Image (spheres, helix red, strand yellow):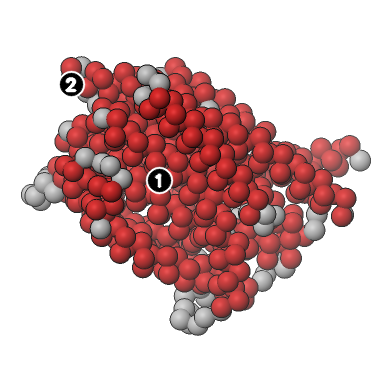
Amino acid sequence: MKSHQRAAWIAEIRALSALALPFVIGNLAWSLVAASNLFLLGRVSAEAMAAGSLATNLYNALQIFGMGIATAVSPMIARERGRRKFAVRDIRRTVRQGMWVTLAICLPVWALLWHAESILLALGQQAALSAQAASLLRGLQWALLPYLWFYVLRHYVGAMERPIWGVIITLIALPVNFLAGWTLILGNLGMPALGLFGAGLASSLTAVTMLVAIVIVISRDRQFRRFQLFGRFWVADWPRFGSLLRLGMPIAVLFAMEVTVFNAAAFLMGTIGQASLAAHAIANQAAALAFMIPLGISQAATIRAGLGFGRGDADAVRRSGRVALTVGVGFAVAAATLLAVLPTQFIGLFLDLRDPANVEVVRLATSFIYVAALFQLFDSTQAVSAGLLRGLHDTKVPMIIAATGYWVFGMGIGSFLAFRTPLAGLGIWIGLASGLAVVAPFLAWRWFSTISRLAVRA
Protein backbone atom coordinates (compact mmCIF):
# COMPACT_ATOMS: atom_id res chain seq x y z
CA MET A 1 0.00 0.00 0.00
CA LYS A 2 2.80 2.39 0.92
CA SER A 3 4.67 1.65 -2.29
CA HIS A 4 1.47 2.31 -4.26
CA GLN A 5 0.99 5.67 -2.53
CA ARG A 6 4.63 6.59 -3.07
CA ALA A 7 4.30 5.78 -6.76
CA ALA A 8 1.19 7.95 -6.98
CA TRP A 9 3.01 10.91 -5.40
CA ILE A 10 6.03 10.49 -7.68
CA ALA A 11 3.73 10.29 -10.70
CA GLU A 12 1.97 13.51 -9.62
CA ILE A 13 5.28 15.34 -9.18
CA ARG A 14 6.38 14.26 -12.64
CA ALA A 15 3.04 15.15 -14.23
CA LEU A 16 2.93 18.60 -12.62
CA SER A 17 6.55 19.32 -13.51
CA ALA A 18 6.11 18.23 -17.12
CA LEU A 19 3.01 20.42 -17.43
CA ALA A 20 4.25 23.42 -15.41
CA LEU A 21 7.70 23.80 -17.00
CA PRO A 22 6.39 24.80 -20.46
CA PHE A 23 3.91 27.19 -18.83
CA VAL A 24 6.69 28.77 -16.75
CA ILE A 25 9.00 29.17 -19.75
CA GLY A 26 6.17 30.60 -21.83
CA ASN A 27 5.20 33.06 -19.10
CA LEU A 28 8.80 34.17 -18.63
CA ALA A 29 9.20 34.62 -22.36
CA TRP A 30 6.05 36.77 -22.57
CA SER A 31 7.19 38.82 -19.59
CA LEU A 32 10.53 39.36 -21.34
CA VAL A 33 8.62 40.59 -24.41
CA ALA A 34 7.13 43.34 -22.22
CA ALA A 35 10.53 43.96 -20.57
CA SER A 36 12.20 44.40 -23.96
CA ASN A 37 9.89 47.31 -24.75
CA LEU A 38 10.70 48.91 -21.39
CA PHE A 39 14.41 48.33 -22.08
CA LEU A 40 14.19 50.07 -25.47
CA LEU A 41 12.14 52.97 -24.09
CA GLY A 42 14.76 53.37 -21.36
CA ARG A 43 17.28 53.98 -24.16
CA VAL A 44 15.11 56.89 -25.33
CA SER A 45 14.76 58.58 -21.91
CA ALA A 46 13.54 58.05 -18.35
CA GLU A 47 10.52 60.18 -19.28
CA ALA A 48 9.64 57.83 -22.16
CA MET A 49 9.94 54.87 -19.79
CA ALA A 50 7.62 56.59 -17.30
CA ALA A 51 5.06 57.30 -20.03
CA GLY A 52 5.37 53.70 -21.23
CA SER A 53 4.69 52.54 -17.70
CA LEU A 54 1.47 54.58 -17.55
CA ALA A 55 0.31 53.21 -20.90
CA THR A 56 1.07 49.56 -20.18
CA ASN A 57 -0.50 49.75 -16.73
CA LEU A 58 -3.78 50.95 -18.21
CA TYR A 59 -3.63 48.43 -21.05
CA ASN A 60 -2.62 45.50 -18.81
CA ALA A 61 -5.54 46.11 -16.46
CA LEU A 62 -7.95 45.58 -19.36
CA GLN A 63 -5.97 42.79 -21.00
CA ILE A 64 -5.73 40.85 -17.73
CA PHE A 65 -9.51 41.03 -17.35
CA GLY A 66 -9.90 39.43 -20.78
CA MET A 67 -7.26 36.82 -19.93
CA GLY A 68 -9.18 35.95 -16.78
CA ILE A 69 -12.32 35.11 -18.74
CA ALA A 70 -10.27 33.19 -21.33
CA THR A 71 -8.68 31.19 -18.49
CA ALA A 72 -12.07 29.51 -17.88
CA VAL A 73 -11.41 27.48 -21.06
CA SER A 74 -8.70 25.48 -19.25
CA PRO A 75 -10.68 24.08 -16.26
CA MET A 76 -13.69 23.43 -18.50
CA ILE A 77 -11.63 21.37 -20.93
CA ALA A 78 -9.81 19.59 -18.09
CA ARG A 79 -13.07 18.59 -16.44
CA GLU A 80 -14.52 17.41 -19.76
CA ARG A 81 -11.39 15.33 -20.43
CA GLY A 82 -11.54 13.93 -16.89
CA ARG A 83 -15.08 12.72 -17.56
CA ARG A 84 -14.47 11.49 -21.13
CA LYS A 85 -10.97 11.63 -22.55
CA PHE A 86 -12.15 12.05 -26.16
CA ALA A 87 -14.94 14.60 -25.63
CA VAL A 88 -14.33 16.17 -29.05
CA ARG A 89 -17.62 18.06 -29.47
CA ASP A 90 -17.63 19.60 -25.99
CA ILE A 91 -13.99 20.69 -26.19
CA ARG A 92 -14.46 22.20 -29.66
CA ARG A 93 -17.47 24.23 -28.54
CA THR A 94 -15.71 25.40 -25.38
CA VAL A 95 -12.76 26.75 -27.36
CA ARG A 96 -14.99 28.44 -29.95
CA GLN A 97 -17.09 30.17 -27.34
CA GLY A 98 -13.92 31.21 -25.53
CA MET A 99 -12.94 33.07 -28.69
CA TRP A 100 -16.43 34.56 -28.98
CA VAL A 101 -16.32 35.83 -25.40
CA THR A 102 -12.93 37.49 -25.83
CA LEU A 103 -14.08 39.16 -29.07
CA ALA A 104 -17.07 40.60 -27.19
CA ILE A 105 -14.70 42.00 -24.53
CA CYS A 106 -12.43 43.69 -27.09
CA LEU A 107 -15.10 45.92 -28.62
CA PRO A 108 -15.72 48.20 -25.59
CA VAL A 109 -12.03 48.04 -24.56
CA TRP A 110 -10.93 49.42 -27.93
CA ALA A 111 -13.33 52.35 -27.52
CA LEU A 112 -11.98 52.98 -24.02
CA LEU A 113 -8.30 52.88 -24.99
CA TRP A 114 -8.90 55.27 -27.89
CA HIS A 115 -9.62 57.94 -25.25
CA ALA A 116 -6.71 56.98 -22.99
CA GLU A 117 -5.32 60.51 -22.69
CA SER A 118 -8.56 61.80 -21.16
CA ILE A 119 -8.69 58.84 -18.78
CA LEU A 120 -5.11 59.38 -17.58
CA LEU A 121 -5.70 63.09 -17.09
CA ALA A 122 -8.82 62.28 -15.04
CA LEU A 123 -6.62 60.03 -12.89
CA GLY A 124 -4.40 62.98 -12.05
CA GLN A 125 -1.44 62.18 -14.31
CA GLN A 126 0.83 64.84 -15.81
CA ALA A 127 -0.39 66.21 -19.15
CA ALA A 128 2.86 65.54 -21.03
CA LEU A 129 3.13 61.94 -19.79
CA SER A 130 -0.56 61.31 -20.51
CA ALA A 131 -0.17 62.47 -24.13
CA GLN A 132 2.87 60.26 -24.66
CA ALA A 133 1.16 57.28 -23.04
CA ALA A 134 -1.87 57.75 -25.31
CA SER A 135 0.45 57.70 -28.32
CA LEU A 136 1.78 54.27 -27.27
CA LEU A 137 -1.74 52.94 -26.72
CA ARG A 138 -2.87 53.99 -30.22
CA GLY A 139 -0.42 51.38 -31.49
CA LEU A 140 -0.80 48.84 -28.70
CA GLN A 141 -4.58 48.48 -28.41
CA TRP A 142 -4.82 46.40 -31.60
CA ALA A 143 -2.72 43.69 -29.94
CA LEU A 144 -5.63 42.84 -27.64
CA LEU A 145 -7.75 40.57 -29.85
CA PRO A 146 -4.93 38.54 -31.44
CA TYR A 147 -3.29 38.06 -28.06
CA LEU A 148 -6.51 36.98 -26.31
CA TRP A 149 -7.27 34.52 -29.11
CA PHE A 150 -3.73 33.21 -28.84
CA TYR A 151 -4.26 32.92 -25.07
CA VAL A 152 -7.47 30.88 -25.56
CA LEU A 153 -5.72 28.54 -27.99
CA ARG A 154 -2.70 28.29 -25.70
CA HIS A 155 -4.99 27.12 -22.89
CA TYR A 156 -6.51 24.61 -25.31
CA VAL A 157 -3.14 23.03 -26.17
CA GLY A 158 -2.20 23.20 -22.46
CA ALA A 159 -5.39 21.46 -21.32
CA MET A 160 -4.65 18.80 -23.95
CA GLU A 161 -1.38 18.35 -21.96
CA ARG A 162 0.82 19.58 -24.80
CA PRO A 163 1.71 23.12 -23.64
CA ILE A 164 5.13 23.05 -25.32
CA TRP A 165 3.67 24.66 -28.46
CA GLY A 166 2.69 27.74 -26.47
CA VAL A 167 6.27 27.93 -25.22
CA ILE A 168 7.85 27.60 -28.65
CA ILE A 169 5.63 30.31 -30.13
CA THR A 170 6.21 32.70 -27.22
CA LEU A 171 9.98 32.15 -27.49
CA ILE A 172 9.76 33.00 -31.19
CA ALA A 173 7.88 36.17 -30.22
CA LEU A 174 10.88 37.43 -28.21
CA PRO A 175 13.22 38.19 -31.13
CA VAL A 176 10.27 39.27 -33.30
CA ASN A 177 9.18 41.87 -30.72
CA PHE A 178 12.72 43.06 -30.01
CA LEU A 179 13.52 43.48 -33.71
CA ALA A 180 10.20 45.27 -34.34
CA GLY A 181 10.76 47.52 -31.31
CA TRP A 182 14.40 48.23 -32.20
CA THR A 183 13.28 49.18 -35.69
CA LEU A 184 10.14 51.18 -34.90
CA ILE A 185 11.03 52.77 -31.54
CA LEU A 186 14.61 53.81 -32.32
CA GLY A 187 14.29 54.19 -36.11
CA ASN A 188 16.68 51.54 -37.42
CA LEU A 189 16.83 49.72 -40.77
CA GLY A 190 15.76 52.85 -42.60
CA MET A 191 12.51 53.26 -40.64
CA PRO A 192 11.52 56.53 -38.94
CA ALA A 193 11.91 56.65 -35.14
CA LEU A 194 8.30 56.34 -33.96
CA GLY A 195 9.15 56.34 -30.24
CA LEU A 196 6.26 55.38 -28.00
CA PHE A 197 3.83 54.74 -30.85
CA GLY A 198 6.43 52.40 -32.35
CA ALA A 199 6.57 50.42 -29.09
CA GLY A 200 2.81 49.85 -29.21
CA LEU A 201 2.86 48.97 -32.90
CA ALA A 202 5.69 46.47 -32.34
CA SER A 203 3.65 44.69 -29.67
CA SER A 204 0.61 44.51 -31.97
CA LEU A 205 2.69 42.98 -34.78
CA THR A 206 4.10 40.46 -32.31
CA ALA A 207 0.62 39.46 -31.09
CA VAL A 208 -0.56 38.87 -34.67
CA THR A 209 2.53 36.74 -35.32
CA MET A 210 1.80 34.61 -32.25
CA LEU A 211 -1.83 34.05 -33.24
CA VAL A 212 -0.95 33.07 -36.81
CA ALA A 213 1.72 30.67 -35.54
CA ILE A 214 -0.56 28.81 -33.11
CA VAL A 215 -3.36 28.59 -35.70
CA ILE A 216 -0.89 26.96 -38.12
CA VAL A 217 0.18 24.47 -35.43
CA ILE A 218 -3.40 23.53 -34.53
CA SER A 219 -4.36 23.20 -38.19
CA ARG A 220 -1.44 20.88 -39.02
CA ASP A 221 -0.95 18.77 -35.87
CA ARG A 222 -2.94 15.52 -36.06
CA GLN A 223 -4.02 15.51 -32.39
CA PHE A 224 -5.26 19.09 -32.52
CA ARG A 225 -6.64 18.99 -36.08
CA ARG A 226 -9.23 16.31 -35.33
CA PHE A 227 -11.15 18.78 -33.11
CA GLN A 228 -11.80 21.04 -36.14
CA LEU A 229 -11.80 24.17 -33.98
CA PHE A 230 -12.15 26.65 -36.83
CA GLY A 231 -14.87 24.92 -38.82
CA ARG A 232 -18.32 26.57 -38.58
CA PHE A 233 -16.79 29.19 -36.29
CA TRP A 234 -19.89 31.37 -36.61
CA VAL A 235 -22.22 28.78 -35.01
CA ALA A 236 -23.32 29.97 -31.56
CA ASP A 237 -23.61 27.87 -28.40
CA TRP A 238 -25.26 30.30 -26.02
CA PRO A 239 -25.52 27.95 -23.00
CA ARG A 240 -21.77 27.31 -23.19
CA PHE A 241 -21.12 31.01 -23.79
CA GLY A 242 -23.02 31.68 -20.57
CA SER A 243 -21.14 28.94 -18.70
CA LEU A 244 -17.82 30.44 -19.75
CA LEU A 245 -18.93 33.85 -18.54
CA ARG A 246 -20.20 32.49 -15.21
CA LEU A 247 -16.97 30.62 -14.55
CA GLY A 248 -14.66 33.15 -16.15
CA MET A 249 -16.04 36.42 -14.79
CA PRO A 250 -14.97 35.75 -11.16
CA ILE A 251 -11.55 34.62 -12.45
CA ALA A 252 -11.32 37.84 -14.46
CA VAL A 253 -12.25 39.94 -11.44
CA LEU A 254 -9.70 38.08 -9.28
CA PHE A 255 -6.98 38.63 -11.88
CA ALA A 256 -8.03 42.25 -12.22
CA MET A 257 -8.04 42.82 -8.46
CA GLU A 258 -4.44 41.68 -8.18
CA VAL A 259 -3.09 43.37 -11.28
CA THR A 260 -5.02 46.62 -11.02
CA VAL A 261 -3.81 47.19 -7.48
CA PHE A 262 -0.30 47.33 -8.98
CA ASN A 263 -1.64 49.51 -11.78
CA ALA A 264 -3.29 51.82 -9.27
CA ALA A 265 0.05 51.95 -7.47
CA ALA A 266 1.61 53.19 -10.73
CA PHE A 267 -1.00 55.94 -11.04
CA LEU A 268 -0.37 56.96 -7.42
CA MET A 269 3.36 57.00 -8.15
CA GLY A 270 2.64 59.36 -11.02
CA THR A 271 1.12 61.84 -8.60
CA ILE A 272 4.19 61.59 -6.34
CA GLY A 273 6.74 62.23 -9.11
CA GLN A 274 8.36 61.06 -12.32
CA ALA A 275 11.28 59.41 -10.47
CA SER A 276 8.89 57.34 -8.35
CA LEU A 277 6.93 56.29 -11.43
CA ALA A 278 10.05 55.20 -13.34
CA ALA A 279 11.35 53.32 -10.28
CA HIS A 280 7.98 51.60 -9.87
CA ALA A 281 8.06 50.51 -13.53
CA ILE A 282 11.42 48.78 -12.99
CA ALA A 283 10.49 47.17 -9.65
CA ASN A 284 7.13 46.07 -11.02
CA GLN A 285 8.94 44.38 -13.93
CA ALA A 286 11.14 42.52 -11.43
CA ALA A 287 8.10 41.37 -9.46
CA ALA A 288 6.31 40.37 -12.68
CA LEU A 289 9.25 38.25 -13.85
CA ALA A 290 9.42 36.49 -10.47
CA PHE A 291 5.65 35.89 -10.56
CA MET A 292 5.85 34.02 -13.87
CA ILE A 293 7.07 30.87 -12.10
CA PRO A 294 4.20 30.50 -9.59
CA LEU A 295 1.81 31.56 -12.34
CA GLY A 296 3.01 28.66 -14.50
CA ILE A 297 2.67 26.26 -11.58
CA SER A 298 -0.82 27.65 -10.97
CA GLN A 299 -1.84 27.06 -14.60
CA ALA A 300 -0.59 23.48 -14.45
CA ALA A 301 -2.28 22.94 -11.08
CA THR A 302 -5.62 24.04 -12.56
CA ILE A 303 -5.38 21.27 -15.16
CA ARG A 304 -4.16 18.60 -12.73
CA ALA A 305 -6.88 19.41 -10.16
CA GLY A 306 -9.50 19.67 -12.93
CA LEU A 307 -8.65 16.22 -14.31
CA GLY A 308 -9.00 14.65 -10.85
CA PHE A 309 -12.20 16.61 -10.22
CA GLY A 310 -13.70 15.41 -13.51
CA ARG A 311 -12.93 11.79 -12.57
CA GLY A 312 -14.35 12.28 -9.06
CA ASP A 313 -10.98 11.25 -7.58
CA ALA A 314 -10.59 13.13 -4.30
CA ASP A 315 -7.16 11.61 -3.59
CA ALA A 316 -5.82 12.83 -6.93
CA VAL A 317 -7.16 16.32 -6.27
CA ARG A 318 -5.51 16.38 -2.84
CA ARG A 319 -2.16 15.19 -4.21
CA SER A 320 -2.21 17.79 -6.97
CA GLY A 321 -2.69 20.55 -4.39
CA ARG A 322 0.01 19.47 -1.99
CA VAL A 323 2.57 18.99 -4.74
CA ALA A 324 1.76 22.30 -6.43
CA LEU A 325 1.90 24.31 -3.20
CA THR A 326 5.18 22.71 -2.13
CA VAL A 327 6.83 23.38 -5.49
CA GLY A 328 5.46 26.93 -5.55
CA VAL A 329 6.83 27.79 -2.12
CA GLY A 330 10.24 26.37 -3.07
CA PHE A 331 10.47 28.61 -6.13
CA ALA A 332 9.28 31.59 -4.09
CA VAL A 333 12.22 31.24 -1.72
CA ALA A 334 14.64 31.12 -4.68
CA ALA A 335 13.05 34.18 -6.33
CA ALA A 336 13.13 36.17 -3.08
CA THR A 337 16.82 35.40 -2.67
CA LEU A 338 17.68 36.56 -6.20
CA LEU A 339 15.73 39.80 -5.86
CA ALA A 340 17.31 40.59 -2.50
CA VAL A 341 20.86 39.90 -3.71
CA LEU A 342 20.80 41.39 -7.22
CA PRO A 343 18.58 44.52 -7.25
CA THR A 344 21.21 46.87 -8.69
CA GLN A 345 22.14 44.46 -11.48
CA PHE A 346 18.48 44.22 -12.51
CA ILE A 347 18.01 48.01 -12.47
CA GLY A 348 21.11 48.33 -14.65
CA LEU A 349 19.32 46.49 -17.43
CA PHE A 350 16.96 49.44 -17.84
CA LEU A 351 18.94 52.53 -16.80
CA ASP A 352 22.52 53.79 -16.98
CA LEU A 353 23.65 53.49 -13.36
CA ARG A 354 26.50 55.96 -13.96
CA ASP A 355 24.22 58.75 -15.17
CA PRO A 356 23.74 61.30 -12.32
CA ALA A 357 20.22 62.02 -13.63
CA ASN A 358 19.19 58.47 -12.69
CA VAL A 359 20.49 58.42 -9.09
CA GLU A 360 17.09 59.03 -7.49
CA VAL A 361 15.34 56.48 -9.70
CA VAL A 362 17.96 53.84 -8.84
CA ARG A 363 17.65 54.54 -5.11
CA LEU A 364 13.87 54.25 -5.14
CA ALA A 365 13.80 51.17 -7.39
CA THR A 366 16.22 49.38 -5.07
CA SER A 367 14.00 49.92 -2.04
CA PHE A 368 10.91 48.80 -3.98
CA ILE A 369 12.63 45.60 -5.16
CA TYR A 370 13.56 44.72 -1.56
CA VAL A 371 9.86 44.83 -0.67
CA ALA A 372 9.06 42.71 -3.74
CA ALA A 373 11.53 40.11 -2.46
CA LEU A 374 9.75 40.02 0.90
CA PHE A 375 6.32 39.22 -0.52
CA GLN A 376 7.35 36.39 -2.88
CA LEU A 377 6.12 33.67 -0.49
CA PHE A 378 2.67 35.27 -0.22
CA ASP A 379 2.47 35.89 -3.97
CA SER A 380 3.31 32.29 -4.81
CA THR A 381 0.89 30.84 -2.24
CA GLN A 382 -2.06 32.92 -3.44
CA ALA A 383 -1.36 32.21 -7.12
CA VAL A 384 -1.11 28.43 -6.72
CA SER A 385 -4.09 28.23 -4.34
CA ALA A 386 -6.26 30.23 -6.74
CA GLY A 387 -5.19 27.98 -9.63
CA LEU A 388 -6.12 24.86 -7.69
CA LEU A 389 -9.52 26.29 -6.80
CA ARG A 390 -10.14 27.12 -10.48
CA GLY A 391 -9.58 23.44 -11.24
CA LEU A 392 -12.55 22.72 -8.95
CA HIS A 393 -14.61 25.48 -10.63
CA ASP A 394 -14.49 27.42 -7.35
CA THR A 395 -14.07 31.05 -8.43
CA LYS A 396 -16.59 33.28 -6.65
CA VAL A 397 -15.26 33.11 -3.08
CA PRO A 398 -11.63 33.58 -4.22
CA MET A 399 -12.81 36.68 -6.09
CA ILE A 400 -14.28 38.14 -2.88
CA ILE A 401 -11.12 37.31 -0.92
CA ALA A 402 -8.96 39.01 -3.58
CA ALA A 403 -11.13 42.12 -3.75
CA THR A 404 -11.04 42.54 0.02
CA GLY A 405 -7.35 41.78 0.48
CA TYR A 406 -5.92 43.76 -2.40
CA TRP A 407 -8.12 46.81 -2.32
CA VAL A 408 -9.34 47.23 1.26
CA PHE A 409 -6.10 46.21 2.97
CA GLY A 410 -3.45 46.59 0.27
CA MET A 411 -4.51 49.86 -1.30
CA GLY A 412 -5.82 51.25 1.99
CA ILE A 413 -2.54 50.68 3.84
CA GLY A 414 -0.46 51.76 0.83
CA SER A 415 -2.36 55.03 0.35
CA PHE A 416 -2.14 55.87 4.04
CA LEU A 417 1.61 55.23 4.23
CA ALA A 418 2.30 57.06 0.96
CA PHE A 419 0.41 60.27 1.68
CA ARG A 420 0.22 60.42 5.48
CA THR A 421 3.82 59.44 6.29
CA PRO A 422 7.27 60.30 4.83
CA LEU A 423 7.49 56.86 3.15
CA ALA A 424 5.91 58.12 -0.12
CA GLY A 425 6.43 55.49 -2.88
CA LEU A 426 7.89 52.93 -0.48
CA GLY A 427 4.67 53.10 1.51
CA ILE A 428 2.71 52.05 -1.60
CA TRP A 429 4.90 48.97 -1.99
CA ILE A 430 4.48 48.08 1.69
CA GLY A 431 0.72 48.28 1.08
CA LEU A 432 1.01 45.90 -1.89
CA ALA A 433 2.87 43.43 0.31
CA SER A 434 0.19 43.78 3.00
CA GLY A 435 -2.59 42.95 0.54
CA LEU A 436 -0.80 39.78 -0.59
CA ALA A 437 -0.18 38.80 3.04
CA VAL A 438 -3.95 38.92 3.64
CA VAL A 439 -5.06 37.11 0.47
CA ALA A 440 -2.56 34.22 0.51
CA PRO A 441 -3.56 32.51 3.80
CA PHE A 442 -7.29 32.87 3.10
CA LEU A 443 -7.01 31.28 -0.37
CA ALA A 444 -4.88 28.46 1.06
CA TRP A 445 -7.48 27.91 3.81
CA ARG A 446 -10.22 27.86 1.17
CA TRP A 447 -8.34 25.17 -0.77
CA PHE A 448 -7.73 22.90 2.23
CA SER A 449 -11.30 23.22 3.47
CA THR A 450 -12.65 22.46 -0.02
CA ILE A 451 -10.63 19.27 -0.48
CA SER A 452 -11.69 18.15 3.01
CA ARG A 453 -15.32 18.39 1.90
CA LEU A 454 -14.51 16.49 -1.30
CA ALA A 455 -12.90 13.71 0.71
CA VAL A 456 -15.98 13.41 2.94
CA ARG A 457 -18.28 13.14 -0.11
CA ALA A 458 -15.99 10.56 -1.71
Q: Residue furthest right?
A: 1
SS state under label 2: helix
Label 1 neighbour load within 10 Å: few <14, some 14-19, many 20+: many
Q: Position of residue 72 (x, y in %)?
A: 57, 60
The numbered mark at residue 243 is none
Q: Position of residue 274 (x, y in %)?
A: 24, 31
Q: Residue furthest front?
A: 420
Up-down: is 422 above or below 23?
above
The numbered mark at residue 30 is 1
Q: Are marks 2 and 1 in contact (CB under 8 Å)?
A: no
Q: Specify the quadrant of the image occupied by residue 43.
A: top left
SS state under label 1: helix
Q: Position of residue 431 (x, y in %)?
A: 48, 30
Q: Residue at x 36, y 24 (%)?
A: 424
Residue 342: in sight, yes or no?
A: yes
Up-down: is 141 above or below 274?
below
The residue singled out by tag 2 in the image is: 357
Q: Residue at x 18, y 43 (%)?
A: 127
Up-down: is 87 above or below 116?
below
Q: Residue at x 67, y 38 (%)?
A: 442
Q: Position of residue 353 (x, y in %)?
A: 24, 19
- Count of number-bearing discs: 2
Q: Amino acid at mark 2?
A: Ala
Q: Residue at x 38, y 27 (%)?
A: 419
As drawn, is 77 to the left or to the right of 220? right
Q: Amino acid at mark 1?
A: Trp
Residue 208: in sight, yes or no?
A: no
Label 2 neighbour load within 10 Å: few <14, some 14-19, many 20+: few
Task: Give the Cα distance between marks 2 and 1.
Answer: 30 Å
